[in-house]
Image (cartoon, rainbow, N blue to C red):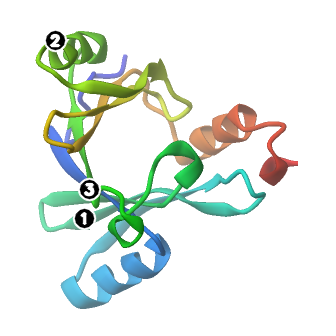
Amino acid sequence: MAHPIPAGQPVITPHLVIKGAAEAIEFYKEAFGAEEIYRMPFPDKDGTFKLGHAELKFGDSKLYLADEFPDYGSVGPANGGSPVVIHLAVTDVDAAFEKAVAAGAKVSMPPQDMFWGDRYGKLIDPFGHHWGISEHLEDLTPAEIEARMKEAFAGSPSCE
C-alpha cells in the first residue's frame, strides 16, 4: 500500500513554471550541480509535447519544474503568471482543501485522482500564491505513469 507522503518526499517543494523548462534544467545542472531525477513530457492542445513535470535534486532538496500550459492556466513569470507553485504533500487532500477554502483560498482545480498515482488539486491563496496539494495513492513506475498518461490524453491531437 502506498503511503500518502512517500518516504523521501519533502512536505513542501517549490514547483517552477517556466517557458523553456528543458533549457532551465540544463542551466540548473550546469550552474548549480543539480541532479535530474525524472522528466515527463505531456501533450499540449496544439499537438506538441512539452515538459509537464520534472524533478531535480539539489543535495537533500527537490525542485519541480514544468513548461507553461496557458490553456490550463499555467503561465510563468515571463508571461505575467505566478513564477512558483508551492507543492504541498498531505495525508488527506480533500480535508486540506476544505480547510484552505474555509480560510479564504480559491480553488483553481478541484482534487481529482491523477494518472501519476496522486490525488491532486490546485488552490490560490488570498495573497495570490498558487498551491498544488497532493495525497499519494499508489506507487507507479515511470512506464506505468507514461501508459496512464497516454490513456488519459487519448484522443487529443498530440496522442494520435
How far apart marks 2 and 3 lie (CA) works out to 23 Å
Under mark 1, the amino acid is Lys
Under mark 3, the amino acid is Val
How far apart marks 3 and 1 lie (CA) works out to 17 Å
Element type at mark 2: helix
Q: Nearer the viewer, residue 41 or 83?
A: 83
Residue 69: x %, y % from top left: 54, 54
Quarter of the picture holding the N terminus: top left
Under mark 2, the amino acid is Ala
* Comparing labels 2 and 1, the label whose residue is closer to the camera: 2
Residue 112: x %, y % from top left: 47, 20
Q: Earlier in the sequence, mark 2 or mark 3?
A: 3
Q: Is residue 28 above or below residue 71?
A: below
Question: Residue at the spot x=12%, y=60% of the render?
Answer: 60
* Farthest-out residue, right: 160
Q: Quadrant of residue 94?
A: top left
Residue 158: x %, y % from top left: 79, 53
Left or right for 94, reference 102 = right
For disc 2, the neighbor class at 10 Å (few under 14, some 14 to 19, many from 20) is few
Residue occupied by mark 2: 102
Element type at mark 1: strand
Residue occupied by mark 3: 84
